[in-house]
Amino acid sequence: MKKIILTLCICFATLLAKAQLGYMYGQYDIGFAAALNYAYTDAETVRGTAAAHLVFAYNHTPFLNYIAEVQFGRLAGGDSVNTLSGRQFKNNYTAVSFRAQVQAGELLRYDNSTIFNALRNIYVSGGVGVIYNNMAEIHRSSLYIPDYTSYGRNTSSEFFVPLKAGYEFKIFNSYDEPFIKVDLGYQFNYMLGDQLDGIKAGTRKDVYSQFVVGMRFTIGGFTSYRKPIRK
């Protein structure tokens, strides 16, 4: 009986020591982000537009994350007056996506290296999503070429592949647990269709890119990692 009690005490002391040394992290985050969008479509002129993101993350480890995201925003492009095609659009869109994200800290031994410690929060991410397109404004006819009109749909839904790279700044609380994450990233969204601008033309698929600044906040599910999270 004494041996069992002693073993339990040792285990408890070990877990407590790990928590004090910065091994603990939260498995669940919620957050938000702002993005600057650029759509590359059948409309010749590219314009910058804004979007907002809502984020939920499951952190399998501090450096391996599964992220569900909802985007609300606008995509725009083209110029009905100053281009031969006359194509111009404004798309008030909603998108839902799921990404797996791996940070360099999952692979590096950063605890004894200043360089690797600085690189550990670099990440790459990829997944799948669905975008719901709604044209708030659309011009498909040319002012300069008689009877020239492009065709497409005012509303549509398409699958897309989100690919993202960036850096995550981790802010630690008094227990050395990461509890706020600040994200600076670039995301490339490859459409599997050709209706992002409400115009179907050519053979090239539509894409849109995003410069993203976001924050996530830990909300619970604390557990320990196999190595110290903070150097």
Image (cartoon, rainbow, N blue to C red):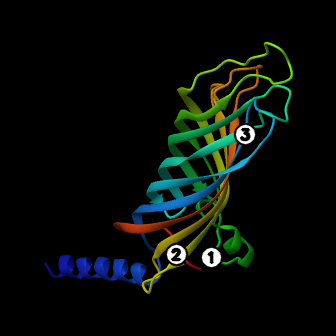
Q: Nearer the viewer, residue 47 or 218?
A: 47
Residue 175 shown left or right of residue 208 in the figure: left
Q: Is residue 155 depicted above or below 115 in this figure? A: above
**Secondary structure state at the residue bearing disc 1:** loop
Q: Which mark is residue 137?
A: none
Callout 3 environment at 10 Å: few (<14), some (14 to 19), or many (20+)? many
The residue indicated by pointer 2 is 228
**Secondary structure state at the residue bearing disc 3:** strand
**Three-letter amino acid code at the position of disc 1:** Asp
Residue 120 x, y percent position in the rendering: 65, 67
The residue indicated by pointer 1 is 111
**Three-letter amino acid code at the position of disc 3:** Gly
Residue 108 x, y percent position in the rendering: 65, 64
- Residue name at image x 48 percent, y 51 percent: 66
Q: Nearer the viewer, residue 3 or 73?
A: 73
- Residue name at image x 32 percent, y 83 percent: 13
**Secondary structure state at the residue bearing disc 2:** loop
Asked whether residue 225 is in view, the answer is no
Give the quadrant of residue 4. bottom left
How far apart in space, not on screen, are marks 1 and 2 (Cα)? 8 Å
Residue 96 x, y percent position in the rendering: 48, 41
The residue indicated by pointer 3 is 77
Which tag is nearer the camera, tag 3 or tag 1?
Answer: 3
Where does the N terminus fall, quadrant-wise? bottom left
Pointer 1 and pointer 2: residues touching (CB < 8 Å)? yes
**Three-letter amino acid code at the position of disc 2:** Pro
